[in-house]
Image: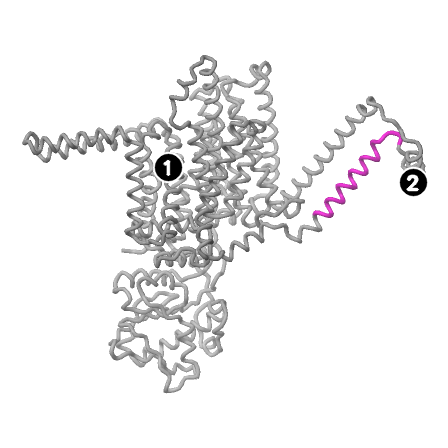
Amino acid sequence: MALEIQTIIDIILVTLAYCVSVLVVPNIVFHEMLREKSLTHRFIVCTVLGNVYLVNIVFLIFLLHIPGKLSLYLFTIIPLFFLWTRINRPGIRRFFQILFMSISRFFLGEAKFKTIISTLSQRPKQYVAALIRSIFSHFIHHIPEWLSLISIFAFNAWYYGYSTVTRYAYGTSDLVVHQKWINVMDQGTIFYDGIYPFGFHNVLYFLHTFFGFSTTTLLRTFNVTQMFFIYTMIYVVLKKICRSRFIPIIGVYIFSVPDLFNYMETMRYQWTLPQEFGMIFLYPCAYFLLSFFEQKKNEYREEQKYRKQNRLYCYLAQYHIQPSTISLVLFAFSFSLTLAIHFYITIIAFILCLAIAVAYFPIILYKRHLIPILISGICSLFLAIAPMGIAFVQGTPLQGSLGWALGMMSTGEESDDTVTDSTIDTQQTQDTNLSDTTDGQSTTGTSDTTSVQKSKNTPQKVTFIQKLQKVPQKVLLVLNKVKQEIKHVNFVASFLFEGCYNGKKTIPLIIYGSEILTVCAFLLLLLRSVTHIGSHVISHMIPSFYYRNVLCTGIYYIFMMLLLCADYLPLPTLMDYTRGRIFLAYATPLFITCAIDLIYVILMRPLRYHFVSEIVPIGLSIILVCLTITNNAVKPLNYIFTLQNPSEVKCNYQIMKEYPDYEYTIVTTTNSLEMIKDHARHYEMATFIKKMDHFTTTKKITIPTKYVFFYIEKKPLNYNFFGPLKNGMNNLGYISRDAAAKQPNYKGIYIYFEENRYILESRFFYWAKAFEQKYPQEFQVYYEDDGFICYRVVQNESQLYNFAIDYGYNK
């Protein structure tokens, strides 16, 4: 089977395994709690609960020092079965009653075994049939949404899976490090390189151990799976906020198809990395926090109604756990996942929660809101930090990248001059304004001195009326200062956004659009709060929560803009520019979509938001698609690093499939080390070449396996070269004798970079040619294409070949 077909099958299987783990199983376990909820709500709840369970189960078995496949199976299945029986107790009790009656009838001869099986399978069949009917019914009633989402996800699957299917190799060197950490977990060690947020590694370890996927397959293909969840979360949170059914799809489309963002904003989504995996749980924090405020308000009103009727016991008897409490628990789970997977996601999640807090001011200060939120925040931090804290107490040191991250979060010295200059300019502006607006103040130095002396000798009394007269002047000064600060921030943002968005004309629209959205949402919220005026202008069909939710998206984008501009403002630097703009791009579709929906809400008020009004967003979507295609604005294939020859990956898969484990050795660079370590022995190419330098007849190099494979690049790669994916792997040209005649460097971390790689591969190639002349029957070509060749040697393990020969360039 071709590796391309095998990769597509792997993508489908990995996606199915992950969806079963985090969607299907939680939906079955919590069926009684979720059966009346919407499809989007069930999706986001199951995603959070499933991942929390996987991450902490893996932490548990490692911190108890009982890692392994058996313990993972037991600790996964037994608690799930216990939860399932507790939550779905009535249905399970009925099932066991039927089981007992069926067995009794069988032993009494009243029923056959086939009848018992049919009776017992009746309830699962009904459950599956009901699930299929609900999905089909939802599809029929939401055909435009389903078709649009399927089309967008199909495009994203092609876009982010293209390099995986066609290039086979990893797109970034970070994946090798993460693969090593997961492989070491197979040996019973977690936090191999020090304490680090291991939630991402725990999930991949679970899929690797529970379902049997290799870590190489997971790291190559899981990026497509996590992409589906990342983009779906945009749709789910917009579905929560927007009033239109179809407008949330526009947000997903904006982030997916048009060439709006710089390639650096979307490049990392084509790789399986912790930061991108953690972005799945960023918007669930907002979703559940917004749900908490809405549910808490409904619960409070209902409680007051029953309290007035002296029937509070009826209200308390309705719930075992209040819906708002469940939302807050899920919020705590979501926030803890961000911290357990990547610290940068936690920073953005905190900014997002801060934006919600500002939008819900002063409601958030109410005791019934503030205290539960603080408690849930503390619990979420404890849930995420506890495993790392236990490991630290057990003697595991911190990983080095944590120090780097903390260093990036501190304010850099480069911004000190900028801050000082802006402060001086602001102070000068204030002084000028003060001199222009103060009554009776002369502009000459003499009069200033005289007035100062008079004020010292004769104290002046300022009346209340005089103070009142100066209030407008002070207000104007404050407004002028705010205006200057906004201009300064917009200027810095417009300069930095050139590296975030494509097209200079779109940058002012985005910056001013976010500010206008924030102001309009705030004014509409105020107008909605005034009963007599709001009833004539703003429809009461729209709750005040809608305007607060729209307001929080605008504030969130402005906060992200300030985060990106922190180096040029008197603000602490929490994140470097290259990482910050990834999250800025991820926040862009939120405020754009909410702005469109706000316009829709205002314009469609006469139609009372009938389903006919959905024609407008559907027409807008069609126009956007047509403009994207006609203007050739579909985003091109992304950029990628040149790290490994695709033919080398193809040979690895083929050899591991055809030959027994550990009965062969592969002589190559270090690129394949982590990929083959569970199946083969690895011999580094630089060491192999170095041992033959200064050749003498006494030199001896033997490899004690029956099969030996030699990977040689006829066109040595330009390692770590960063270029467009459509251009293919960048190389240094064909090997040459001139390069082989040069002396390579065998030390340092840049052995396989640029010219030194060219020299080593050239020597390796001419060694292979010399060895082939010496042993033409034994030294065979296993695989060859235009830029790569693989040789194979089959040897007697009791009489090994001596691979040290004189190949003309090693004397």
Task: Identify the image quadrant of residue 536.
Answer: top right
Q: Residue furthest left?
A: 109
Q: Which residues are magenta?
A: 419-440
Asked whether 781 falls inside the magenta stretch, the response is no
Residue 622: percent from left, percent from top: 45, 32
- The residue closer to the viewer here, 197 or 679, is 197
Q: Residue furthest top?
A: 309
Indicate whether 126 appears above or below 539: below
Q: Amino acid at mark 1?
A: Cys
Badge 1: residue crowd in 10 Å (few <14, some 14–19, many ≥20): many
Q: Amino acid at mark 2?
A: Gly
- Mark toward the start of the polypeptide (1 vs 2): 1
Residue 637: percent from left, percent from top: 45, 49
Specify how the rendered protein is coloured. Answer: one colour
Q: Main secondary structure of the magenta part?
A: helix
* Comparing labels 1 and 2, the label whose residue is closer to the camera: 1
* Res 622 seen here: no
Q: Residue furthest bottom?
A: 697
Q: Secondary structure at mark 2?
A: helix
For the C terminus, the quadrant is bottom left
* Residue on which the image places disc 1: 46
Residue 538: percent from left, percent from top: 55, 19
At a point 73% along the width and 44% down the height, the residue shown is 423
* Residue on which the image places disc 2: 445
Q: Secondary structure at mark 1?
A: helix
Residue 258: percent from left, percent from top: 49, 41
